[in-house]
Image (spheres, rainbow, N blue to C red):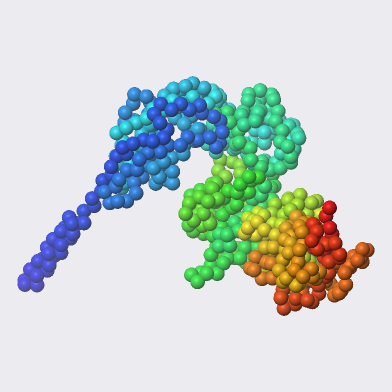
Amino acid sequence: MKTKITKVVALFTTLAIIFSCTEDMEYRDTAVSPVNQLYEPISGKSVELVASATASLFFEWEAAKAEDSGSPLYEIVFDKEGGNFSNPLYKVLSDNNGARNYATISHKTLNKIGAAAGLNSGETGTIIWTVIASRGLSTAMSNVSHKLTITRMLGFAEVPSQLFLTGEATEGGSDISQAVPCSSPEQETFEIFTRLKGGKSYKLVDKTNDNANYFYIDGNRIVEGEGETTVEKDGIYRITMDFSIASVSIQEVKSVGVFFCPSNKVIFELSYKGNGIFEGEGKVTFKQESWGKDQRYKLLMSYSDKDMYWGTLNDVDSSPNGAGQEDSYYFIKEYGINEGSEPQWNHKWKFDNQFDGSMTKVTVKFNGANYTHFVSLGDGVSPEEPETTPKNLFLTGEASEGGNDISKAMQYNKLGEGIFEIFTRLQGGKTYKMASSQEADAEFFYIEDGEIKSGDGITTVEKDGIYRIKVDFSNKSVITKEIKSMGLWHCWDRNVLLDLPYIGNGVFEGTGTISPSNNDNRYKLLMVYADDSELIWGTKNDTDVEPGENPDPSYFYIMETNDDAEAGQWDRKWKFNDGIIGNNTKVRVIFTGENYTHSIEPVN
């Protein structure tokens, strides 16, 4: 009996403690103060809304204060003139997902708010706005509001239920029954990723038969009628058409690639296959970390004016685990290249384990109800080693001096069988690759982790600069060095007398007065790399005479030496001719052809 009483007492003691703790730890919400001042736009401001994807209006207000000194969240609320915000027309989070005391609201959103207020297309009317501050479950509406007069955009009263592209410029040609369908990512908006022929015409139709209604694009507006539109050049284009505001955005898509998050770069590109589909394959190698293998990836799309990520629509953080091609796991959404606190890692997927070390195919579909992608094992051979050694080598791509036009690719200098070198300017963050010729059927190569790989992969450098790139197909090696400066180096003074800026196509050139001490006429060339290491270029033929009036071209041939600038002060030098010292002189160094060379001559 004593034992039972003891247990009962213990139970009640425990319950008392629990209830006591519950009462002590009761959640108390943090109070937040209302916003006392609205700054922008000033009350009574009038805005004529325009049909532009970048048009916006800036809103700003005084910051609220939270009881716990934390940061409140904010919503802007809109209502009809005379309303009290109890049943608002529209709510918009402030910038940075509600964390900022300001917001940038697009004209398109304001146009929707005007429509909700009962304004017709092109009509002018007044709405009111205020701000709600919140912290946890506590909210506080500002006790002030501002008026805003807007003039709605001229949109279409009747929006087509579907839209197609037809015409000579399109993938379906002029046969309207083969018109290419657009997707509809949101209400009253249509979009298409498609190939268009430059100089040829296209138009928009709402049906694929003779009963179709016609539209065309005039600048950045949609116009009803049988007009026609052209693009200047062949290309892959993203066309977004918003019938609610009659606006159009056209972007040229330069490339789509698989962005491997651990490497912070595109590991292989996807080619356009038609009907809004991009597809490509390359080798995927997970990155070994102390905690395991990193397999995170997303997609990078380069437009003609900017780069954008395409990442997961649903922010998954797992492998697909057997998800099928139509599974929402693979749905994609576009994000800014610098969006979020960790743009390299945000909105990523994870490759399934089977793709580690394997040729992998990625297919991206910009058509249908949901933009999506899928990953499968590739059909090709893993590009561990180049299958062939090219007779010649060229550099092409957006990062290169010749751009994406392979017929303008820059030729490497051939140093020996399978050994090539180039001095060239590259654009940071943009891509380049190597080609066996300047023809469309060229074999391609790229650089991965300092090795040459066969295939249509790509390479980047981090920043704009002048680079010396040497590739050796016998051992698949690549050496890339950034060049900081090139100059004419005087042996007696032991310094650079004339800087030689890079002017393109492997040529450095500078003009100025050469005035050495002691009128000594001995000189060499000094190259300084980005890591501040120095390389002396001296005479290939070790001459010790002046060139004279009609020198043999070989007199000016150059070769790199193993000496640093001062230790080899007098070795492998050239001499100025009479008339160079004290006069305006042009010096040119040419890193092209069978023999690197230079010239030095007076300038009138």
Of residue 190 and residue 99, the one placed in the foreground of this image is 99
The quarter of the image holding the N terminus is: bottom left
Inspect this view and state whether residue 322 appears. Answer: no
Residue 366 vertical position relative to residue 463 in the rendered view, above or below:
above
Relative placement, left or right, of 408 versus 320 is right
Residue at 37% of width from left, 38% of height from top?
A: 61
Q: Please identify the residue farthest to the left as the structure is shown.
A: 1
Q: Please identify the residue farthest to the bottom as the structure is shown.
A: 567
Residue at 63% of width from left, 68% of height from top?
A: 531
Of residue 9 and residue 472, the one placed in the foreground of this image is 472
Q: Residue 384 is drawn in which quadrant?
A: bottom right
**Count of numbered tags:** 0
Relative placement, left or right, of 322 versus 476 is left
Relative placement, left or right, of 599 versus 194 is right
The percent coordinates of residue 337 (x first, y second) are 55, 50
Q: Please identify the residue farthest to the front as the structure is shown.
A: 518
The percent coordinates of residue 156 (x first, y second) are 56, 24
Residue at 84% of width from left, 53% of height from top?
A: 604
The percent coordinates of residue 403 (x first, y second) are 73, 51
The percent coordinates of residue 73 (x first, y second) are 36, 45
Inspect this view and state whether residue 111 appears. Answer: yes
Relative placement, left or right, of 10 versus 321 is left
Residue at 73% of width from left, 57% of height from top?
A: 502
Residue 289 vertical position relative to residue 240 in the rendered view, above or below:
below
